[in-house]
Every structure is written in C-alpha cells, then in structure tokens.
C-alpha cells in the first residue's frame, strides 16, 4: 500500500508541473505585420473631409472666418473646366456679359453649404490668384476700417497713370471678394491686377447686388470670383463672377457674368502688364457731373438727375456720371429715382 501511494504522489506532482508549464504565457513576439494591422484604422470620408467652420456670435466673427482653414484645396474650381476663351466674345464696349445663361456653375454639393465661410486659393507658380469662394452674409462683413495695401504687388502689377482714366491709375489692386463683403484687404490670394474700368464698371455693380441683398434680407449668398488667365499671362483677361442666394434657392439673387479686364483707350500686354495709349476710345469716365445727363448710383443701382439731393450724399466710388439715355440705363438694369425722375420707365 505504501508503494502504491508513493507512486500516486509522484504522478500527481508530475501532472501539476505539466499543467503549470502549459499555463505560462508565451514570450514569442507578435510579428510586425500583425502589430501594424491591429494599430491601423482605415481613413474614412468623415476623417479626411474638411467641414465648414461653424459660425459663432462674437465681436471678431469676420476675422475668425477669414482665418479658417483654406477650403479652396477641397473645393478646387477651374474656369477651364466649364468655360473656354472661345466662349467669350471680344470686348465691344460692354463691361460685363452674361455667361451660361446667367446661371452659376455651382454643384449640388456647393449648394448644401450650411454656415458662413470665406476661402482663397493658393497662388500658383507664377504668383497668380485662382478662385476666391465663400458663403457670405452679414456676419462676414468687416467690422473695422479698411487699411491700405500698397505694399502688395499682384502678378503683372504696374503703377501707370493716364489723364483720362478715373483717378488716374490704370491698375487697381482688385479684390476678388470685395472688402465690403468679406473684410479681407491685405491677403495676396484675394488681390489681382485689374483695370480701373473693370473694378468700377464691371465688378462693383455686381458686388453691390450681393451686399444689397444680404443687408435687405439677412440671407446668405454662395459667391465665387475666378480670375481668367490665358496661358502664362500675368494679368487676367477678366473675372468670372457667380452668385446664388441660398435660403430662397436663387430666386432673390442669381448671376453668372464675365467682367472684362480692359481699359478703353489703352492697349494692355496681358503677358507682362505693360500698357500704352491707343486713342481708340473716349472713356465714359470723362463725362463730368456738370455735363452729364444722369448720375447712376452703382451701389443702389438708381438713376438720378445731376441736381438730385441723393447725388450730394453719394459716395464718389459709387457715382457714375453718364450721357447714356434713360432707356439705355434701364435696359442695363438700373432703376429711375422716385424723387427726381418719378420712377419713369421710358427715355425722353
């Protein structure tokens, strides 16, 4: 009996040791490939997609919006995808023409914008601007005073003057998205070399349409301005301007126009920005307030007689003295002042 018990004890001890060895964790390392597979999380669209900045109600809201991440990289827009220079007729005296039936090229994704933002494209290898894009409203309008940006020289810049050009200088530092709309004044990505004519006769009336709509409704406008450069030209041939009012699905404001970067009476080398007088055209800006038939307020788009009280209160930037007939001005979309012209709708 004692021998049998001894053998049983030895067998039990051996089984215990064997079981203990089987429970010891393996010290074998996990293969590198397996380790990477465990730690790697596949990227999803929600992780890589740039979201629109959420609008907050603060005193420096406009500044905050303008410092948001550059969305242009995510919202790349090239005019060459939707427009050919062959689609644009030569300049014949009209500062602006309608493009694509006056319907902007925004996509369905663009139209789903749900909060305010302003985005500027990076300069290209030649230092040229590309599309400036935003969902603009009263919250993007500037809160402070506009400052000078004389140190910025957009591509093709020259400081040339002519006696017959309004305020003498041929070229302006033209904002793609106007300072009054987005508050950006010194960002090189928002400034191109544009003629005084394009700035005031071409772009300003359409910028004012956006401003007036925003101020009157409190709604938002999807807005994009794209400079059109031919080849390696340093000066844009013109700008494509698009606007679409979001809350009312475009019924309040919608346009798609091209503004010519020209100056009547001056020949421009768009490759370099060099220029010279050609004597081919007498600029409309030569008409003075004393000699003109009407004064148009480019901001309100109202037509006034020169002695109207409203003319005295008008900003010089918005003032356009002209000898065009009342009928022609109405055809251009301007409206007669109720006070001095009684709202009449036909020329006399």
Image (spheres, rainbow, N blue to C red):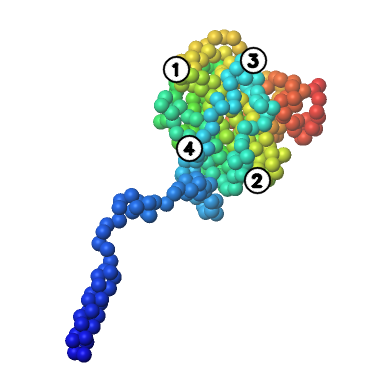
Decide which of tag 1 and tag 3 comes sooner along the chain: 3
**Residue count near mark 3 (Cα–Cα under 10 Å), binned few <14, some 14–19, many ≥20:** few
The tag on residue 92 is 3
Q: Is residue 298 visible?
A: no
The tag on residue 54 is none
Could you say where residue 95 lies in the image, as x and y percent from the top left?
63, 22
The tag on residue 272 is 1
**Residue count near mark 1 (Cα–Cα under 10 Å), binned few <14, some 14–19, many ≥20:** some
Q: Are marks 1 and 2 in contact (CB under 8 Å)?
A: no
From the viewer's perspective, is 226 left or right of 304? Answer: left
The answer to which of 14 and 220 lies nearer the viewer is 14
Decide which of tag 4 and tag 2 comes sooner along the chain: 4
Mark-to-mark CA distance, 4 and 2: 26 Å
Q: Are marks 3 and 2 in contact (CB under 8 Å)?
A: no
Mark-to-mark CA distance, 4 and 3: 36 Å
Frontmost of labels 4 and 1 is 4
Q: Which residue is mark 4?
A: 73
Mark-to-mark CA distance, 1 and 2: 41 Å
């Amino acid at each position: 009996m004692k021998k049998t018990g001894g053998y049983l004890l030895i067998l039990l001890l051996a089984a215990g040791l064997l079981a203990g060895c089987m429970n010891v964790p393996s010290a074998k390392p996990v293969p590198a490939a397996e380790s990477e597979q465990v730690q790697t999380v596949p990227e999803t669209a929600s992780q890589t997609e740039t979201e629109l900045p959420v609008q907050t109600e603060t005193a420096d809201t406009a500044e905050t919006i303008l410092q948001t991440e550059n969305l242009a990289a995510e919202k790349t827009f090239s005019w060459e995808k939707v427009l050919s220079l062959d689609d644009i007729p030569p300049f014949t005296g009209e500062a602006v023409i309608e493009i694509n039936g006056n319907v902007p090229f925004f996509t369905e994704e663009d139209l789903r914008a749900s909060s305010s933002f302003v985005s500027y494209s990076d300069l290209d290898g030649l230092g040229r601007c590309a599309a400036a894009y935003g969902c603009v409203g009263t919250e993007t309008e500037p809160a402070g005073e506009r400052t000078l940006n004389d140190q910025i020289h957009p591509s093709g810049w020259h400081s040339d003057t002519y006696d017959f050009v309004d305020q003498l200088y041929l070229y302006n530092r033209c904002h793609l998205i106007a300072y009054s709309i987005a508050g950006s004044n010194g960002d090189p990505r928002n400034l191109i070399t544009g003629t005084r004519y394009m700035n005031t006769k071409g772009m300003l009336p359409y910028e004012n349409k956006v401003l007036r709509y925003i101020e009157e409704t409190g709604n938002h406008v999807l807005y994009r301005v794209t400079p059109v450069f031919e080849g390696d030209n340093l000066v844009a041939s013109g700008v494509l301007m698009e606007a679409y009012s979001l809350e009312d699905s475009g019924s309040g404001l919608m346009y798609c126009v091209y503004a010519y970067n020209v100056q009547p009476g001056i020949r421009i080398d768009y490759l370099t920005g060099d220029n010279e007088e050609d004597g081919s055209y007498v600029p409309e800006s030569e008409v003075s307030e004393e000699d003109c038939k009407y004064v148009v307020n480019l901001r309100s788009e109202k037509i006034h007689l020169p002695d109207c009280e409203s003319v005295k209160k008008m900003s010089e930037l918005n003032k356009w003295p002209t000898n065009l007939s009342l009928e022609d001005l109405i055809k251009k979309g301007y409206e007669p002042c109720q006070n001095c012209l009684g709202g009449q709708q036909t020329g006399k």
